[in-house]
Image (cartoon, rainbow, N blue to C red):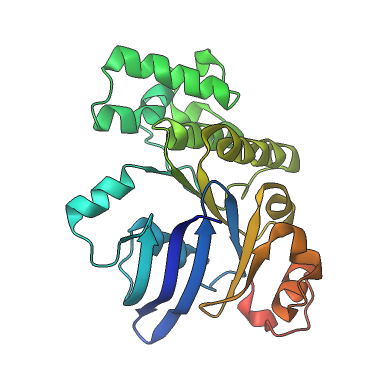
Amino acid sequence: MTVKIAVRGLEKAFGPKRVLQGVDLDVPEKQSTVIIGGSGTGKSVLLKCIIGLITPDGGSIRIDGREMVGASDDERRAVQGRIGMLFQGAALFDSLPVWENVAFGLLAEKRLGRHEAREEAVRVMRSVGLAADVADRYPAETSGGMQKRIGLARAIATKPEIIFFDEPTTGLDPIMADVINDLVRACVRDLGATAVSISHDMASVRKIADRVALIHEGRIRWEGPASSIDASGNAYVDQFIHGRAEGPIRVGQVA
């Protein structure tokens, strides 16, 4: 197993609250890893530390063996140029038409001119099930499911090596959630990308994950193949996946 992202002893506190308390995590290359856990357990903070949106207080984050904690701006930009991100709320630019949202990275990095960027945006949109006539609409003129697909198209338009998914199915009906799950799997299969997702939706986890890691109180309590999750022998995992009130996870800690 080739490790794409290696996290060791990661710590992060906000005032007196210690959110990450020594996280260790390996993310294999060209696989889909899903981090599960209740609300407030550190999933989003861990993801933002890996991406570089939050600076950890201690520990190590290596991407392809390159240390990111304490890296220079140039070193960080070089790595971030190989990363795509699907935000939980899609985070589209309301003032830009759909095609410019999708082509935002291509235009910002001046990889293509506007005409070529629009053509590429339409091609990528079709790959996630969006018709060409959506290109000139504005985000407010599209549905929630379409906005998720627009966000996904933007995330993959630059052909990233690593794609992060923040609760990719939150707020979607079961059918649209399954469509998004299929698209996440396709990103790993067709792009050869390394995917890291955070989710509490077990139906989604079972569909998209090659590996699963459970975080609780700022520590990884279990990680392993998704195929082993039902027989993990881990009390935290067993309680979480079955939604039981009794167990090591206190009820007030999970929203």
Q: Position of residue 152 (x, y in %)?
A: 51, 36
Is any atom of residue 69 visible in this view?
A: yes
Residue appearing at x 78%, y 77% in the figure: 233
The quarter of the rendered structure image containing the C terminus is bottom right
Is any atom of residue 86 visible in this view?
A: no
Q: Position of residue 195 (x, y in %)?
A: 53, 48
Residue appearing at x 36%, y 76% in the figure: 59
Work out whether residue 12 or residue 254 is closer to the camera in this orientation and state it.
12
Work out whether residue 251 or residue 4 is closer to the camera in this orientation and state it.
4
Residue appearing at x 42%, y 21% in the figure: 121
Q: Is residue 47 above or below residue 139?
A: below
Residue appearing at x 72%, y 47% in the figure: 207
Q: Is residue 216 above or below residue 100?
A: below
The quarter of the rendered structure image containing the N terminus is bottom right
Q: Is residue 145 above or below residue 75?
A: above
Q: On the rendered structure, is 69 left or right of 28?
A: left
